[in-house]
Amino acid sequence: MSNPFYLTRAADLDDNQITKLWVDPSSNLMRMLRPASRLPMLILGGRGSGKTHLLRYFSYPVQRRVYGADKMLSHVRDTGYLGIHTRCMGLYTNRFTAKRMSESQWQALFSFYVELWFGQLILQTALDFIKDANALDSFDENDVVRQLIGLFDDKPSQVIQTLTEYSAFLKHLQRDLDGQVNMASFRQPICPQFLINSGRLTFGIPKIFGESIPCLKEIQFTLFIDEYEHLYVEQQKNINTLLRERENPVSFKIGARLHGMRTYQTWGGDEELKEGSDYELLNLDVDLRSDKFNYQEFATELCLARIKFENSGWPSGWNDQNAALMFAKTFEASLPVEETVRLQLQKRSGDSPWIENVSSALTAHLNVVGKLGINNAQDVVTILERLRFVDNPLIEKTSTFIFYGAWEDQQNLLEAAESIQNSALEYSLKPKPENLHAKKLNHFSEDMRDQMLADLKMDQNVGPKGLLSRYLGVETWIRMSDGIIRNFITTLKHVYDWALFRGEGIYSSSAITLSSQSQGVLDASRWFINDANVLESDRGMVDASVKRIANLLRKLRFSEKPSECSLCRFSVNLNTTSPQARRIIEAAEMWSFFIRDRDRRQRNPGEQLTVLRINPLVAPQYYLPVSARGNIDLSAEDCLAIFASQNDADFKRIEREKVGRCTPPFNKRLIDYDNEPDLLRLSSI
Amino acid sequence: MTNHSDKFPEFLSLVKTLASSAWKDANIDAVKIDRWLNNFRGVVATADTEMHHAFHLLSQLIYFGENEINECLRILFQEKLAYQFVQEQKKNGLNSSAIYGALLGHLRDHVRFVGVGSASESGTSFLYPFRKANGIPTQVCSSLEKVVNFGMPAQAGAAPPISFSPSTLTEIIYLDDFCATGQQVESREGAAVKAIRASAPSMKVHYFIIFATNTALSYLRSLNLFDRVEAAIVFDDDYKAFSLKSHFYRTPHQGIDQATGKLVMEHYGRLVESDPQHILGYRGSEMLVSFKHNTPDNSLPTIWKENSSLPWHPIFRRIEKLSFS
């Protein structure tokens, strides 16, 4: 048996795989891309969001596989476009720089190179279509070639009479230029045989074809330009200019990473591309996460397509009707957290750890809680009696949480404990909405469950029965992928790797064990962090920043009195943040360590905050929630300490202040971390 | 069966990575690992301690798959033979294609590679991949019987007359896969090599090994049996599991120590290996090596020895030689 999720990057798939692994349950992706639309489109998305798969699928070679060569004439007429895909990486753009030549010389050469590159692609795709349409005899080839030659200012010396010869001519010019550019460090000056203006071939060839070849009349040539982030600023300006000065019948769909658009400027004076008039924007992963797109259905269908492709059909016992269900059942289910907790508590003697923690906190701070009605050890005993709820650990844990809240609010603690006791009893019988426990559990139930596991020391070393169990199962992984489909596929890849290594039958019910799932999730999380190709100069700082903010959120989340539930977001004012901190935040966002939320909370009127959350795929390493709700505000000083400070001392101070407010005795006393044991002995990146 | 390997996640993760990469040809999976760990029942220490130490040693094993062995065969030919010839020819002012032609001609007319042992043994079995990896003409790899013809001596005690095929032969190169002590090749081929030297003193006889210990190289060179003794990969004392210099214990994980590891391997080595001098590998080699084609008996027997009566389930099973007595 082999791993159906082994290949994770669309760039590594061949055309057959692109075709067979395409999933678009409600034709939403076709509607989003609109390949025949005249207005160019920028498609921005995080790494693995599906840009390449999307652009390649709608390109001519793949569409031909989908519909069949003999159907392409009618298909192209129906859809109205011819899709031409190219990757910017193929241009090897780093050649066009330095080597003792001026920027303007490189600009001219690159512009010409792009014309040759696009020209060949357009020509080849059109030729393929003409052949598929059996339309080779439907036009005067000599006349078309004569017009194409006319696109050059100087007539070539060789005789060119056919489209094939013209294509070979362009290829020859490209190879000549390749050779000269590659040798530019050793041999100068570079002197290409020809130079033409930007756009002559890109727009000229399609225009001539549209006017001269019947099957291409009124057909749009859509250039899918992928991996735009590989171009330097000046090179992007070149293609931005083509976008802005676009001529029918050509349009563009440009795919780029988040922050992959290094510039919106063009060569036309100081003109910039304007959204709405020069291009429309598709934020792919944002849209995939939105309500209008059924991401869960999409992700599931994609998995099933992979399984069917890898096995050349359904596994034994699977069919079109039951495949989704069979797939979900493949994974062993975790025990509910409460059941795990009960089993652990049965092995202990004495109180649960959260009751013991209350006892320790009160005893350690008797001098402080004296003002709150606690005068002696007997009072502590009374409080513990009132907080205990042995029959239901979750209620008991919540009682301690509410108690810490009362402590923070400086209430009389004996009276508070009595109220909590009554509330617990009422909640266990028939909770009303205004019940204390009901209100807390409405928001903090997941946090309480995770805190119980943490209090019982059920961290990573325990394996899949503890905190890691919160990150298992297909539905959870779909949520963790957060619109980035590659993250989901990669998680499955690692899970299946472990399952195959363990000899588990990957297509049988409950076959993929919790152990394989948990180890796979951790491997996927580590992969995600290591895969980011952050600039070397920023790498250390980005890593440190992600670690700091994730650890801070974790400590707040597992403190006695977290202020917000499901805490994994933070908000910053990017306008007041230092440039260095802002650069690191944006680098972390570019590599999807942080995901920008739509919310833009206003702390003060007129203040715009940017809300970011930790990527859910990073969550398992820090036991952060997968679903984002809670948020902490970071001041400019906080941002400096977390994202820009080279030494940890500044961050530690900020961390102590913030966590101190959520920890008994809930004042600004700084916690001495060197001497206080962490609740969780966790490994971190 | 209990998933013992789950108790040692640090080793499990490492071995899983090895299994999918460097050990790919060995088809190791968690089932085999657990079956092997299950051998350790908690006699000299707790079962978990024994398994922990065994797993640590397993994670240190060096495996040579097909790609690695082919690369070693290229090293053996190119670095130990071809480059010297090429350097000499360059002094004569020849260009690259002429040198290549001269090399092929030299091999065809003057050099023969032969295997150690019989046709069915591992040393001989490497002649084909050696030839393929280096693009050597077929006739250059042969057997000793085809290359050397011993006649009857004219009188008792005299050296037998000898003829070679081709008659222009000047170098015979023995090819072998693994040499840990040097004694096996001495016992197998020593008489033939001495006979060749006695009858044709000008003939060069070399011994090329893919993998050898420095002990074996020193020993064989001291014998003056061969003109040259060369190896592609040399193992020194760092590769003896329980030597003072052993690099398997330089930065061990918490809870791992060499003394306990040795205690465990000695105890179970005694169970699986009847000859006491081999309980830590042939003549105390203490190696942790395996190859795609087999595991040498120089490796710890707990790794490779199969014993159905115990039972003992090896992880890198050795295919033992059978012979008719």
Image: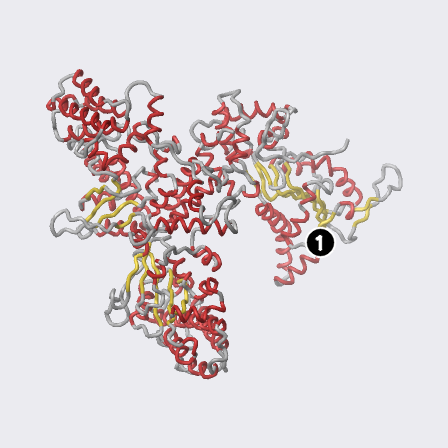
User: Is B139 placed left or right of A220 in the picture?
Assistant: right
In the image, A273 versus B162, the foreground residue is A273
* Residue B78 drawn at (x, y percent): 61, 51
In the image, A538 versus A131, the foreground residue is A131
User: Is A45 placed left or right of B218 in the picture?
Assistant: left
* Residue A88 drawn at (x, y percent): 39, 63
* Residue B253 drawn at (x, y percent): 44, 31
- Based on the displayed image, in which of its 4 quarters is residue B63 positioned? top right
Element under label 1?
helix
- Based on the displayed image, in which of its 4 quarters is residue B232 positioned? top right
> Mark 1 belongs to which amino acid?
Thr
Residue at x 11%, y 50% (from the top left corner): A605
Furthest residue toward right: B155
Relative height, residue B158 to residue A280 (above, below): above
Furthest residue toward top: A378
User: Is A326 placed left or right of A276 in the picture?
Assistant: right
Number of disc labels? 1
Is residue A368 among what the camera can see? no
User: Is A614 placed left or right of B117 in the picture?
Assistant: left
Residue position marked by numbered label 1 in the rendering: B138
Say which chain tag 1 marks: B
* Residue A640 drawn at (x, y percent): 21, 45
Residue at x 60%, y 41% (from the top left corner): B292
- Based on the displayed image, in which of its 4 quarters is residue B7 positioned? top left
Residue at x 77%, y 48% (from the top left corner): B147
Is residue B222 among what the camera can see? yes
Quadrant placement of the C terminus of chain B? top right
